[in-house]
Image (spheres, grey):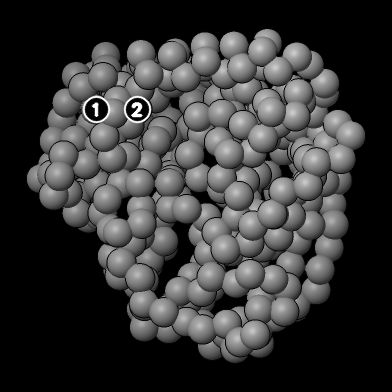
Amino acid sequence: MEVKAMSVSAANISSLGSGATIPVAYYPKDIEQLRQIQRRHAARSRLFIAGALSNTLVLEMTPDDATIFCSAMRGIRVHEDCITVRAGEKTAHVADVARICGLSGMEDLCCIPGTVGGGVMGNAGCYDTAFKDVVKSVKLFHLDDGQQEELSGEEIAFRYRYCNLRKNVDFITEVTLRLFPDGVSAIGARMSDVRKKRKQTLPTGKSLGSVFKKIDGVSCGYYLDRLGIKGRRIGGMQVSEKHAGIIVNRGDGTPEEYLALVELCESEIQKATGRKPEREVVIFGRNQ
């Protein structure tokens, strides 16, 4: 089946509730549709790979910029102590499937928004667990040459909020997670604890989650709190009054205002520590 392009407003689908129009968006369901996109755009366009826009800020894009979403690639197979997941499945849903099947390892990840594909690419994590701890293997489609590849978790070379897969080139199509058996009630109890803890410490409302990676194990929210940046506002975007490491949309914030706050926070942290923090939030768009 031919894959069709469409125009999408990032503001309507982003967890931030803000973002520019994506002029060319694709939602492929299989490898053949990925091949169609690769042949159509390889020579003339910038290609961006997106999950659910749960940690991605979309700025103005050029008419030729094309974004490929993994969210239409769905499917879950459970086999012994492993779960094989297509990239568009939501991480929270996969964690719940694991619980129902009596497979442990995903409890700390049960509240992470977004897709499994996006989670693997950013080595997303929470508390004591990250995707590196559960990924057995990953299947890829290379947007530069149209080839497919399968890598083990060890070959991906995960580090803190990082993996060595190529951004906007290596499209994750499928992930196999290695888990271990445990009681359904015990797994459920741990997931409930994680949900309660996150509810107590993280702000409600529209955001892209943590803006920056930790510096030597210290949250950038800690520095921003001590620097008096908590609650700072530019237009409709605000550094959360509950957790200074997160910027929230107060209802009418623009992506440009979000970026301006990010740059303000970067500058203040660099002045205080001598180091510019690395962004955890991904930015798509012109000049990015």
Residue 140 in the image: state x and y as whole percent.
75, 61
How many marks overall?
Answer: 2
Quarter of the image for the C terminus: give it: bottom left
> Disc 1 marks which residue?
240
Query: Who comes first in sequence, dot 1 or dot 2?
Result: 1
> Does residue 122 appear in this view?
no
Q: Is residue 162 above or below residue 67?
A: above
User: Going by the picture, which residue comes out furthest to the right?
Assistant: 80
Query: Circle 1: is it few (<14), some (14-19), or many (20+) Cα within 10 Å?
Result: many
Q: Is residue 99 above or below residue 253?
A: above
Disc 2 residue type (three-letter): Gly
Query: Circle 2: is it few (<14), some (14-19), or many (20+) Cα within 10 Å?
Result: many
Which residue corresponds to the image point at 47% horizontal and 82% vertical from the top-left?
5
Badge 2 marks a residue whose secondary structure is: loop
Confirm or deny contact between disc 1 and disc 2 (CB under 8 A). Answer: yes
Q: Nearer the viewer, residue 98 or 247?
A: 98
Residue 256 in the image: state x and y as whole percent.
22, 55
> Disc 2 marks which residue?
245
Badge 1 marks a residue whose secondary structure is: loop
Which residue corresponds to the image point at 43% horizontal and 53% vertical from the top-left?
53
Q: For this view, does 229 lie left or right of residue 202?
A: left
